Image (spheres, grey):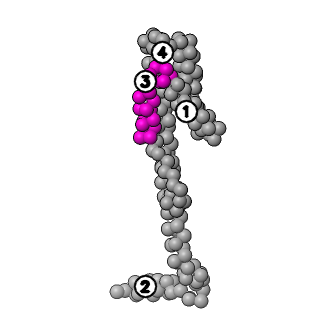
Amino acid sequence: MNSNTIFDINKRRKLNKVDMTEVDYDMDKLLNLEEEYYQQGYQEGQDFSTKQQYNEGKEYGYQTGFQRFLIIGYIQGLVNYWRENIDQYEKGIENKSLRNHISQLNELVQNVPTTNGMDEVKEFEKRITKSRNKLRVIANICKELWKVNKLDNLMNEIGGKLQVSENVDDMW
């Protein structure tokens, strides 16, 4: 080794030496690593949960929309069927009354609100209730109550049934 190389090595050693009194450690940060990692994990969990809930909400919205408009479609199908075949039901039935009921039912299922606001949901539920009642009247006139029973079964199958219990503890 020549003297220049030794000089360079010594020079680097002196430059790399650090006076420990000049180093400023943030002792609170060093001692609170656990809290820092906890907060990081908490934030990651919260972000994941937010995405998961968004996706579940979207899925629930699609499912509910499908259920609602499957029911509306079934009712509209019955209205169309009865309109096309009204002549076979007119024997012994007042024609005007049956036509009037079918027309009223058709008005109920036309232009059903498709948004999810509180007022629109109430309007939808009100129309469905009125439609089911009107369906029962028409089915009784036409002596086809089984069609209403099929709708009720469809509603229970796709919408489920509300479980109600006398004891509040049994409900949850």
Q: Residues within 10 Å of mark 4 (few under 14, many from 20)?
A: some
Name the disc covering residue 128, or none. 1
Quadrant location of residue 74?
top left
Q: Nearer the viewer, residue 88 or 154?
A: 88
Gap in angstroms between the C-alphas marked 2 and 4 = 102 Å
Name the disc covering residue 83, or none. 4
Span of residues in magenta: 138-158
Tag 2 and tag 4, C-beta contact below 8 Å = no
Q: Amino acid at mark 1?
A: Ile
Tag 3 and tag 4, C-beta contact below 8 Å = no
> What residue is shown with label 3?
144
Is the N terminus in the top left, top right, bottom left or bottom right quadrant? bottom left
Tag 1 and tag 2, C-beta contact below 8 Å = no
Q: Amino acid at mark 3?
A: Glu
Gap in angstroms between the C-alphas marked 3 and 4 = 14 Å
Task: Look at 56% across and 12% down and name the residue there.
Answer: 96
Gap in angstroms between the C-alphas marked 1 and 3 = 19 Å
Q: Amino acid at mark 2?
A: Ile
Task: Look at 42% across and 36% down and name the residue there.
Answer: 154
Give yes or no for residue 164 being in the magenta stretch.
Answer: no
Dominant SS type (magenta): helix
Task: Look at 62% across and 38% down and name the residue there.
Answer: 122
Tag 1 and tag 3, C-beta contact below 8 Å = no
> What residue is shown with label 2?
9
* Mark closer to the observer (3, 4): 3
* Mark closer to the observer (1, 2): 1
Give coordinates of residue 129: x percent, y percent.
56, 34
Task: Look at 44% across and 18% down and name the residue there.
Answer: 81
User: Which is nearer the N-term, disc 2 or disc 3?
Assistant: 2
* Count of numbered marks: 4
Gap in angstroms between the C-alphas marked 1 and 2 = 89 Å
Q: Residues within 10 Å of mark 2 (few under 14, many from 20)?
A: few
